[in-house]
Amino acid sequence: MKRTKFKYPSPSETPDLEESLNTEAGSQFGFWCLNIIWTLTLGTFALFVGTGCESTNANQSQSLAPSTPAIASTNALVQSCLLCHSTREMQRGPIIDGLPAWYIEDQLTKFMTGVRGRNSTNKSEFLMGSGVSLIKSDADVETVVTYFSELPPANHLKTVRGDATRGQQLYTLCATCHGPAGEGREDIKSPPLTMQEDWYLYDQLVRTKAGLRSRAQDDPQGLLMEQSIQGMNTQDFRDVVSYINDELSGRAKPEPAPTN
Ligand code: HEC
Ligand code: HEC
């Protein structure tokens, strides 16, 4: 893999994990979850992997059964990513299973160089700004990129409701960069949209429009994306994500019937 050289963030530049956990994202978790994540920073997290804990975030806790291979066979670094990136209940980050290697590597480089993840007003991105400090070398990048890109994409529950027919019309704009089938375009570093959970697609559209994703001045691709959706509102985002879910991804399963 060809990789641009980056400077690993020094501890003073890296947002403090515990501090992040006391923010918005941290409040979504119970005491034990906080303990588990904190334990991660002490390097003994392996003992706790698999304990599970209750997330109070409705969207993120609705994942289907784990699709990841036996966690025991993966190394400690991968396990630390899985604390936030698995379909286990302690999940707080997006599912990245099956995303192409070039995209995962590109995003990790953006987090490592501070293009993403240094803006503390974007709590979720800031949290990953801490998560990426687990990566200490090029070999680490290789390990996690290989692991996640080789996983089969995961199914997920449909949580975003919109008008998919209207979304199809809106998608013509997206198709220019993300491909007519949502397959992505490596040449312009535009990711596929068929593997991510719908809540994450929607969430990133909202954050990107608000200028919260990336530091646009350092990121020509991010800037393109940000500018191209400025004319859209949240209903447009729900509609286009519904179209992606229903027609392109095929991974979103119907919402469970209401229980009340
Ligand atoms: C403390 C929790 C946490 C840890 C640990 C963590 N991440 Fe993340 N990660 C997140 C969150 C939250 C996001 C979503 C950021 C956003 O909302 O902008 C994210 C985003 C990402 C993305 C971008 C996904 C996309 O499509 O935009 C990649 C790639 C990623 N993480 C990989 C990793 C890898 C590899 C590791 C292990 C070295 C790791 N993460 C460790 C929380 C974490
Ligand atoms: C001009 C090209 C362009 C257009 C048009 C465009 N995008 Fe993007 N999009 C990108 C690029 C490039 C990225 C990666 C940005 C980055 O690296 O942070 C991206 C990122 C995204 C992400 C984040 C995915 C992830 O895993 O984090 C979503 C969601 C997304 N686009 C959806 C859309 C939708 C829906 C539309 C149409 C309404 C659209 N985009 C239009 C280029 C574009």
Image (cartoon, grey):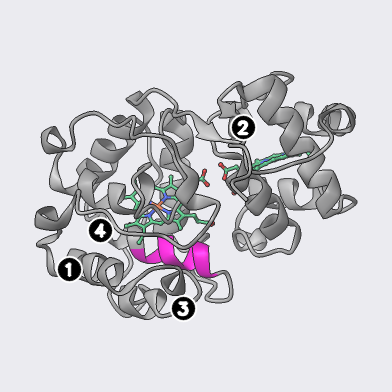
Q: Residues within 10 Å of mark 2 (few under 14, many from 20)?
A: many
Within 8 Å: ligand 2 and the Cβ of disc 2?
A: yes
Q: Residues within 10 Å of mark 3 (few under 14, many from 20)?
A: some
Secondary structure of the residue carrying tag 1 is helix
What stretch of residues is rendered in magenta? Answer: 123-130
Who's the residue at 52% across and 60% down the image?
115
Q: Which residue is mark 2?
A: 193
Which three-letter amino acid code belongs to the residue tagged 2? Leu
Q: Label 2, secondary structure: give it.
A: loop
Q: CA distance from mark 2 to mark 1?
A: 33 Å
C-alpha gap between disc 2 and disc 4: 26 Å
Location of mark 3 (residue):
23
Residue 141 drawn at (x, y percent): 29, 43
Q: Amino acid at mark 1?
A: Thr
Q: Is residue 247 above or below residue 197?
A: above
Q: Which of the marked residues, 2 or 4, is nearer the chain's N terminus? A: 4
* Image location (x, y in percent) of residue 259: 59, 46
229, 249: nearer the viewer = 249
Q: Amino acid at mark 4?
A: Leu
- Ligand 1 neighbours mark 4 (CB distance < 8 Å): yes
